[in-house]
Image (spheres, grey):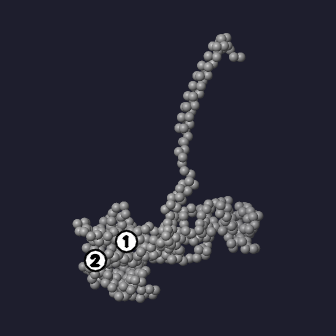
Amino acid sequence: MFDDPITESMPEIQNLTLEELERQISRLRSIVGREHGDAERLRRRIPHGRLTPGQIQEALTSRLEQTYEPPGHLRGGGEPRHDNDCADIHDVRVAPTNEELLCPLPPYLPAFLPTAPHHLPQSSMERHLDIQFRLLREEMMWAAVSISHPCTDCVAPSACIRQSVGEIRTDLDIMWTPGAHERSPTLLEKLLSSKGGAYKASGANSVFFHLYTGARFAPLKAERRNFTVGLLLNSPPGAARDQISKKRAEYWENSKRLQQGSLVALALVSPGRFQVFLGTIVSFGADIAESAKPNADTIRIRISFFDTDVELMALRRQPISVDQSTYAVLLDNKIMFDALNPFLRTLKEIEPTSIPFSNFISHSGNLAFLSVGPPRYARAPQFKYNLQCLALPGETVSSVDVNNVASVAVARQQLLRSSQLDPSQVDAVIATLTREISLIQG
């Protein structure tokens, strides 16, 4: 029973008292609600509109589509970037051409993403090979090792062959600019004056490669598969110019410069003209050492060029180093072309449909939804796996038919009971025998 003096008060006083109580309670509710909200906000992190993985992927795809420019004749206007820009990788020469090296446009490098734009159908082996070939070819253009600077203990990263050619071209543009006699000499001019050395530029786009001057043709030589062009070069500064022939020979025998199989660039310079021809060195260190013995100022190497134009010039013994305006230099980025060339040739020449497991390799969707059946040989009628070799002495494990669910279940139970395999090993064995492709860890 409610017993309070207010029950004996006048109705007007009762109403006034109840209104005041209600106001106070409402005020307390407001305070409690505010403080509770502050406490909850401190306890729980409020999301700030974070993007989901799907939204991030969609934004990336949209950005790639905006900057996408297809290869070869598929470009806007049907005009390729250069003579080696082709839609079909079968038509792309592994070694860059002169036009490609001097092209100011960036190369066509497709993104290795399922939703990224590409000129070939999605989830096709042709598309997968195209991406692998173009990205590996671009990676080949960069030396994969660090080169120690010959005069210091520091280690400088080498440069892309395209970037090295671009640096030479930039120096030439400066040198060819009329009325620029008051400027500082370019790196190229310094190396021409010293008859070779290391080209090392600092900054954001730093490059490092070896440059050899005074290139001129020596006799052509017929090899087993092709012709090789002989080149006479100025010996680089340092131990290679030692006055004692034995020390010069020892230097080249132990040197990592001009290694057999390296990709080199012969740059021909004449007034207003710049050409670049790539080739691989076929001479060994002992061959260069032998050529260095008679003369401290000259060495000779043999190169297999990719362009027949160089072979024709060598046959004619065309002078390529004449004076200060017409000369030839050799660039060495220490890129081992022969190490990657077989893989690149296979990627561009292989028939896509002949690659095993191509449906798994080129699949672009979620692998969790990809159906994986038994191996093809296990689908043959009457085929069964003989698992008796896994049984303990005196025990029996039945042969398993992977196309029969009951047979697989029986084999699983017998392996658990009658073999030395633990449950996880049994699962791995059964999964491997019943799936066309599997990965076992442990």
Q: Nearer the viewer, residue 338 or 438?
A: 338
- The amino acid marked with disc number 1 is Val
- Badge 2 marks a residue whose secondary structure is loop
Label for residue 165? 1
On screen, residue 162 above or below 54: below
Residue sitting at x 72%, y 71%? 379
Q: Nearer the viewer, residue 370 or 65?
A: 65
Does residue 395 show up? no
Q: Nearer the viewer, residue 257 or 311?
A: 311
Crowding at dot 1, Cα within 10 Å, few <14 / some 14-19 / many 20+, comes out as: some
Give the number of callouts: 2
- The amino acid marked with disc number 2 is Ser
Residue sitting at x 59%, y 70%? 125
Q: Position of residue 389 (x, y in %)?
A: 69, 70
Residue sitting at x 54%, y 42%? 45
Crowding at dot 2, Cα within 10 Å, few <14 / some 14-19 / many 20+, comes out as: few
Q: Nearer the viewer, residue 439 or 88?
A: 88
Q: Position of residue 420 (x, y in %)?
A: 67, 63
Question: Relative to residue 356, is residue 245 drawn left or right?
Answer: left
- Badge 1 marks a residue whose secondary structure is helix
Q: Position of residue 228 (x, y in %)?
A: 40, 84
How far is the residue under mark 2 from the one under mark 1? 18 Å
The residue to which callout 2 is attached is 325
